[in-house]
């Protein structure tokens, strides 16, 4: 009896997997350290690829504009250098947007914090002076309020010491600090260079990756993997484009409305709401909460009206603008959006809240395709597979109304006539009485 080498190889593979699994469970810390070290090495390339993915759609628009200019007589230079000019303009616009937000928001925000600090001191003094006249407070509460003391200088020194000690703990020494700064600059430079290379050679890289997939994997698996990759790319691009556009529109609406209504900190609050609106569901509300607090220390009545304005603008944005701008770009039901935001926030913080929505959308679309394919294999429709509900219902297949089916399999008018006492034979309809032909 000869040896079954195929079965031996299968058992050897199972044994090897078991040994690797046991070793991995015994050395989880080592594996985690190795993964962290590897991610640290490739971090500049991950950041560069992420920036390239975000900038690829603006680059396509700007490059198309230069190609259009180059199609005119005497302007062929723009067509020949459209890619490099597009990359240059895209990076300049990206840097200008970041610098504009920093120089507009940060000084105003620091000024608002200064006003907030002085307002808190005044509020505490007023509370201490008037708390003795409030009959609903106990003597312990009055004594606690009277003992409140805000020493901003001491708090500032404590914060400075905490930052210095924390930095010393992390960096270890001056050499470590210099090394960390140099490493950060080098990694940032590498990310930018890698991003430019990806944007400049994206077509060639796409063809090379496609060839590699078809060379390594079977044809069907490679084609399916490319299909999933394209779907994931389109989903992520549509989501980010829609979110950024919607955030800009929402911030502009708040700035115009707050300027007309003479609310304080119109620019700071508008930019803050626009930036935080990139975080789905919770972002705009966080910006509104901060804005309400900033206005509250200056004018409580205006803070109340700001809440009213926020609710009105949110209704306009959610019911009119968001469906038009974003719409069903990710194709994910609302309940799964909430689940994705919750899980993403718990796993990766703010970044997870943003990334998990398109990621869930990809998995949702794949699951829907697999479910429909399985139903087709079983020759079932979604209506037949779903449980019936009481009351009047109509069978639907792919969104189309299906006529009722009679006892003999007739549909439409034939079924209706059969129910009224008609039968259909050889293309003719005869009336029946008591089950016999009339």
Image (tube, rainbow, N blue to C red):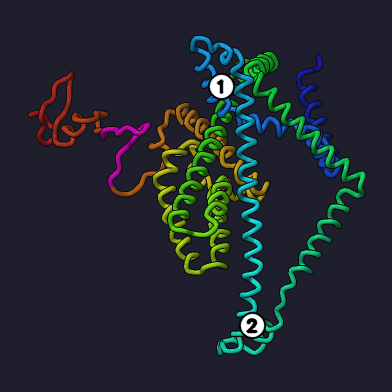
Regarding mark 1 in the picture, which secondary structure is present there? helix
Q: Mark 2 points at which residue?
A: 128
Where is residue 386 shown, x and y percent of the image? 41, 41
Closer-to-camera residue (226/420): 226
What residue appears at the point 62 percent right and 54 percent down from the top-left corner?
Answer: 108
What residue appears at the point 18 percent right and 36 percent down from the top-left corner?
Answer: 419
Residue found at the very far front of the displayed protein: 74
Where is residue 12 shown, x and y percent of the image? 81, 26
Where is residue 408 shown, x and y percent of the image? 25, 29
Closer-to-camera residue (332/86): 86
Looking at the image, residue 295 sits to the left or right of residue 39; the answer is: left
Where is residue 47 shown, x and y percent of the image? 71, 34
Q: Name the residue under label 1.
A: 63
Closer-to-camera residue (386/339): 339
Q: In this view, does 303 lie above or below 24?
A: below
Q: Is residue 394 above or below residue 374?
A: below
Is 101 part of what is drawn in magenta?
A: no
Extent of the magenta region: 392-404
Name the quarter where the C terminus is drawn.
top left
Looking at the image, residue 51 sits to the left or right of residue 28; the answer is: left
Q: How far apart are marks 1 and 2 (CA)?
A: 64 Å
Q: Is residue 148 above or below residue 17?
A: below
The quarter of the picture where residue 62 lies is top right
Residue 56 in view here: yes
The secondary structure making up most of the magenta span is: loop
Residue 428 has which mark? none
Residue 218 in view here: no
Looking at the image, residue 332 sits to the left or right of residue 83; the answer is: left
Looking at the image, residue 213 sits to the left or right of residue 18; the answer is: left
What residue appears at the point 61 percent right and 30 percent down from the top-left corner?
Answer: 55
Estimate how packed mark 2 is, as few (under 14), some (14 to 19) or many (20 or more) residues with alpha carbons within 10 Å. Answer: some
Closer-to-camera residue (364/260): 260
């Amino acid at each position: 009896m000869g040896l079954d080498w195929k079965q031996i190889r299968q058992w050897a593979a199972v044994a090897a997997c078991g040994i690797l699994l046991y070793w991995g469970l015994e050395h989880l810390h080592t594996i985690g350290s190795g993964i962290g070290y590897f991610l640290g090495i490739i971090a500049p390339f991950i950041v560069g690829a992420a920036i390239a993915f975000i900038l690829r759609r603006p680059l396509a628009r700007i490059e198309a504009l230069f190609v259009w200019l180059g199609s005119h007589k005497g302007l062929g230079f723009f067509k020949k250098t459209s890619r490099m000019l597009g990359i240059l303009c895209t990076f300049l616009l990206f840097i200008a947007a970041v610098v504009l937000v920093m120089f507009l928001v940060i000084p105003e925000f620091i000024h608002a914090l200064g006003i907030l600090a002085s307002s808190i001191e005044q509020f505490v003094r007023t509370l201490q002076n008037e708390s003795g006249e409030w009959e609903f407070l106990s003597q312990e509460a009055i004594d606690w309020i009277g003992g409140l003391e805000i020493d901003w200088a001491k708090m500032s020194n404590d914060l400075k010491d905490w930052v210095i000690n924390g930095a010393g703990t992390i960096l270890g020494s001056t050499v470590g600090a210099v090394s960390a700064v140099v490493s950060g600059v080098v990694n940032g430079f590498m990310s930018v260079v890698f991003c430019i290379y990806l944007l400049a050679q994206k077509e060639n890289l796409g063809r090379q990756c496609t060839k590699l997939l078809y060379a390594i994997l079977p044809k069907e698996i490679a084609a399916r993997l490319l299909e999933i990759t394209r779907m994931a790319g389109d989903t992520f691009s549509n989501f980010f484009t829609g979110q950024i556009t919607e955030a800009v529109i929402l911030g502009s609406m708040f700035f115009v409305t707050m300027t007309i209504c003479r609310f304080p900190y119109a620019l700071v609050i508008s930019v803050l709401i626009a930036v935080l609106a990139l975080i789905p569901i919770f972002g705009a509300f966080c910006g509104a909460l901060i804005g309400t607090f900033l206005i509250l220390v200056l004018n409580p009545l205006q803070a109340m009206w700001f809440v009213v304005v926020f609710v009105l603008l949110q209704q306009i944005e959610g019911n009119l603008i968001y469906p038009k701008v974003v719409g069903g770009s990710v194709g994910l039901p609302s309940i799964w959006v909430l689940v994705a935001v919750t899980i993403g926030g718990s796993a990766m913080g703010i970044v997870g809240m943003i990334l998990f929505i398109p990621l869930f959308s990809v998995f949702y679309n794949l699951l829907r395709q697999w479910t429909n394919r399985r139903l087709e294999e079983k020759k079932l429709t979604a209506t037949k597979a779903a449980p019936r509900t009481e009351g009047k219902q109509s069978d639907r297949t792919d969104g189309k109304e299906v006529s009722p089916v009679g006892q003999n399999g007739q549909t439409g008018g034939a079924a209706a006539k059969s129910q009224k006492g008609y039968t259909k034979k050889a293309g003719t309809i005869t009336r029946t009485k008591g089950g016999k032909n009339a």
